[in-house]
Amino acid sequence: MASINIENFGAIRDAHVALGKVTVLVGPQGCGKSTVARLYAAFLWLEKSLARKSLRKSDCTVEYVVSSVFAYVQIDHLIRDDTRIRYRGDRYSISFTSDSVEIKARKGDYSLPKILYIPSERSFISVVDDIRSIRNLPSVMYELASEYSVARSLLGTSGYDIPIDGFHFDYSSSNDASIISDKERTYGIPLDRAASGIQSVLPLALVYDSSIRGMEYKGKAGKQLLSVEQVEKIRKLSERFTLDKPFVRPADRIQHILSIAGIDSMPSSKEAYQELAGQLGLIVDSHVAAIIEEPEQNLFPDAQRQLIEHIVERLNVSGSSVLITTHSPYVLAALNNLIYAGSLSGKKGVDSVVPAGFQLSYKDVMASYIEDGTCASIKDDGLRMLDPSSIDSCSRTINDIYSRLEDIEFGEG
């Protein structure tokens, strides 16, 4: 099982974070949830680059890791003299301190992930037409904007059904209009004037679905867009792809692969692009490793539930993984339902309450509470569930205040 041990890095003093198919990080503002999430993304990329030999062990100096990897995900300023980070991945164990980087290969199966970071600032993409014209935004925002542009270009005339409350998204390249409408398409409004929850969830869901959709095409019958010779050439060269930054834009990556295969241009149709993405994914990336900050952002509680179910269903389809940071007890409660249903898998009537594609195994879920620089599991092995009360102390406080007020009222009476 993958894990990260962190000592004296940013707000984290001493924390062990276990990573699974679904990893959940909870805790108050400023506790270090995003720090852990960004560290995970950084080490995922280092591991992937080492595995496909686009990066050598000798290249991984402290200066390189700090300036090229940590800086990209904006955590380079969190290093202290006594910082120590130990990442245990599927292919490599990597130990980082302020003066050394140690890398050890591990035995076992390893498959290349497509690393997808979806930051909490994603709503910005919904209201700005050309995000690349704005300077000094976080690098992950430019990366998400590129992913979003590619995903949106695949919509064609079919649009996209947002996985909450029946909303539909249309994009017209002719007039650059982004339109949100209700399920019955009785009305539509520009995306930049839509509800804040829609502006938050659309970039998340669209990019996430588009990334996983490419993985779904692996192994499916379809038109062979690459010749056998081209496929073999890509296979031989794929481990030597050189990257100029950690999270290469999808369009740039695909264009680079096509140029190696001797193909001059990108496919023009949505269907051809998807088929090609599937074939290239089979050669290069095998699954999505998604990191999503606060999926509940600006969403009504029931919409939070719908989104979590959607995220898990797509994971189950593709064999991918996700790390989520959250403040919401509804996110944990929704996951608990999926875990509970998974424990009842095969029993009559379960699938009618929670469809099989949504169900989770308890062992595949890791959940940690981060506070005061330390980390503790919020998994209850007795109940085989997560503990939503770990982030819902507010309800207890509100109920306590109400009870005290009742005592005052009826005590005086």
Image: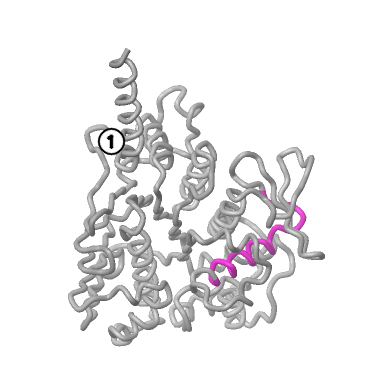
Q: Is residue 60 left or right of residue 154?
A: left
- Residue at 21% in and 83% down: 99
Q: Tell me which residue sits at (22%, 56%) in the image.
A: 374
Which range of residues does the magenta coloring cover? Answer: 142-160
Which residue sits at x=29%, y=26%?
404
Would residue 147 be counted in the magenta stretch? Answer: yes
Using a 10 Å C-alpha cutoff, classify the residue at mark 1 as few (fewer than 14 neighbours), some (14 to 19) or many (20 or more).
Answer: some
Quick one: which residue is furthest to the front in this view? Answer: 412
Q: Residue at x 63, y 62 (%)?
A: 151
- Amino acid type of the residue tagged 1 in the rendering: Arg
Q: Which secondary structure, mark 1?
A: loop
Residue 337 image offset from top left, x and y in percent: 41, 34
Quarter of the rendering occupied by the C terminus: top left
Residue 281 location (% of width, % of height): 53, 65
Which color scheme is applied?
one colour
Up/down of 149 relative to 194, above or below:
below
Is 13 in the magenta? no
